[in-house]
Image (tube, rainbow, N blue to C red):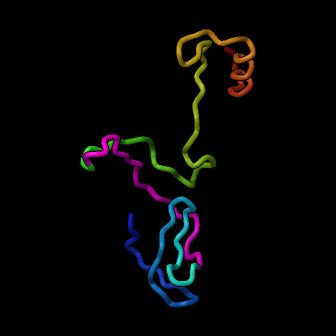
Amino acid sequence: MLITETIQCPDCRSTKNITDYVRAEILCDNCGLVLEENIIENNPEWTNYQSDSDKNKNRVGSPLTLTLHDKGLSTNIGKYNRDFNGNSLKSKEKNIIKRLTNSQL
């Protein structure tokens, strides 16, 4: 994604910017000065599971957000006595789940 707004670097006066969404920063391409921090990228994450076509893209989850402590990557643990395959949990595993969820199974 390109930033439509051009930010002028106060050090070298360059208007060429690099947007780093992993670090949530906008950098000066000339001198490397961090121009903006904690930028929020609101676009959804899309991926293509078929390498032959760029048109068939599937949604892989909500976009990351810096407004939440975990950037929106939280995990919900269900209150069931079974694992993913449907097998009953062992008592040790139930205790771990109970401790993680602060609930009773």
Q: 94 above or below 48?
A: above
Q: Residue at x 58, y 34 (%)?
A: 75
Measured as percent of width and height from the top left, residue 8 is found at 48, 84
Residue toward you, 77 or 103: 77
Q: 66 or 25, which is in the foreground? A: 25
Q: Residue at x 47, y 77 (%)?
A: 17
Q: Residue at x 58, y 17 (%)?
A: 83
Task: Answer with the quarter of the image where residue 62 lies.
Answer: top left
**Relative side of 28 to 54, left or right:** right
Give the dominant element type of the magenta stretch: helix, strand or loop.
loop
Within the magenta stretch, is there residue 46? yes
The image quarter containing residue 93 is top right
Q: Nearer the viewer, residue 99 or 45?
A: 45
Q: Is residue 57 left or right of residue 28?
A: left
Q: Position of residue 96 (x, y in %)?
A: 73, 22
Q: Is residue 90 above or below residue 55?
A: above
Q: Which residues are magenta?
A: 33-53
Q: Which corner quadrant holds the C terminus?
A: top right
Q: Position of residue 100 (x, y in %)?
A: 71, 28
Residue lying at the far top of the rendered structure: 88
Left of 70 or right of it: where is 7?
left
Q: How many marks?
A: 0
Residue 52 to residue 1: above or below: above
Location of the N terminus (image quadrant): bottom left
Residue 87: % across, % down:
58, 10
